Image (cartoon, rainbow, N blue to C red):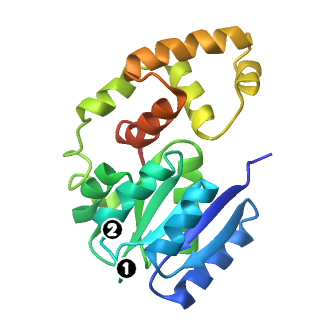
């Protein structure tokens, strides 16, 4: 059964946020914790609840997204942050990814496009419009930090994906048919490759940089 994701919506227009809320809740596997028209209220809920998904407006009245997005990502490293904008996404994509976003979507996108993007995030992929090919995709190069993620094997990446989603070590061990002790051994190797020393640091680094190396285009 697909895991139910908690969602926080932050935007300038209450009517638009209500429409998005209805679209998400009709999908059946998404629960909207709340809609917020200011960064402060939304950021507090994100910090306290660690939702799987945060949809936020690029333009908010009380602060710049360049300031608030890194702060929220730091407070909830396993959350996916998707920026909704009516500007040209090609110009914003790379800067927003560097700030911690997991994706970007036009405010004019259809409900199916929004749900497709979320479906991609569930599988660990970043979905982009085909029209962006050649203008956005080719300039994206892995940073030095994402290079550490590249060192992980397929099994190690799977383990990190599960940990980021909150799956227990015992369940991960059952999923890949290994012992619980083997998971600990995998984690020690992962920490070395990611150049971290704690689980929290591994989650933050993996969640922040893994999207840069495994794009999928919608």
Q: Are marks 2 and 1 in contact (CB under 8 Å)?
A: yes
The quadrant of the rendering that contains the N terminus is top right
Q: Which residue is mark 1?
A: 60
> 22 left or right of 55?
right
Q: Where on the picture, by quarter, is residue 213?
A: top left
Please provide percent x and percent y for residue 71: 39, 56
Which residue is more in the foreground, 167 or 75? 75
Decide: is 13 above or below 144.
below
Decide: is 43 above or below 59.
above
Question: Which residue: 34% across, 24% down?
Answer: 148
- Crowd tier of the residue under label 1, counting other residues whose Cα lies within 10 Å: few below 14, some 14–19, many 20 or above: some
Question: Which residue: 59% across, 25% down?
Answer: 159
Residue 109 visible in image: no
Which residue is more in the foreground, 168 or 109? 168
Cα–Cα gap, marks 2 and 1: 8 Å
Please provide percent x and percent y for residue 115: 59, 63
Please provide percent x and percent y for residue 154: 51, 21
Question: Which residue: 48% across, 44% down?
Answer: 125
Question: Which residue: 37% across, 79% down?
Answer: 60
Q: Where on the picture, by quarter, is residue 15?
A: bottom right
């Amino acid at each position: 059964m697909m895991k139910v994701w908690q969602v926080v919506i932050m935007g300038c227009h209450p009517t638009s946020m209500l429409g998005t809320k209805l679209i998400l809740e009709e999908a059946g596997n998404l629960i909207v914790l709340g809609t917020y028209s200011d960064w402060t209220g939304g950021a507090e809920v994100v910090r306290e609840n660690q939702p799987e998904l945060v949809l936020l407006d690029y333009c908010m009245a009380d602060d710049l997204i360049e300031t608030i997005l890194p702060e929220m990502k730091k407070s909830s490293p396993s959350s996916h942050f998707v920026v909704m904008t009516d500007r040209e996404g090609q110009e914003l994509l790379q800067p927003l990814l560097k700030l911690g976003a997991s994706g970007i979507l036009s405010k004019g996108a259809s409900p199916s496009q929004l749900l497709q993007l979320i479906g991609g995030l569930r599988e660990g992929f970043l979905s982009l419009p085909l029209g962006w090919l050649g203008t956005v995709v080719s300039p994206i190069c892995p940073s030095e930090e994402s290079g550490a993620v590249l060192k992980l094997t397929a099994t190690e990446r799977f383990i990190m994906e599960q940990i980021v989603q909150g799956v227990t070590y015992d369940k991960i061990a059952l999923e890949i048919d290994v012992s619980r002790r083997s998971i600990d051994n995998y984690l020690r190797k992962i920490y070395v490759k990611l150049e971290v020393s704690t689980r929290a640091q591994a989650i933050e680094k993996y969640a922040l940089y893994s999207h840069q190396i495994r794009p999928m285009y919608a």
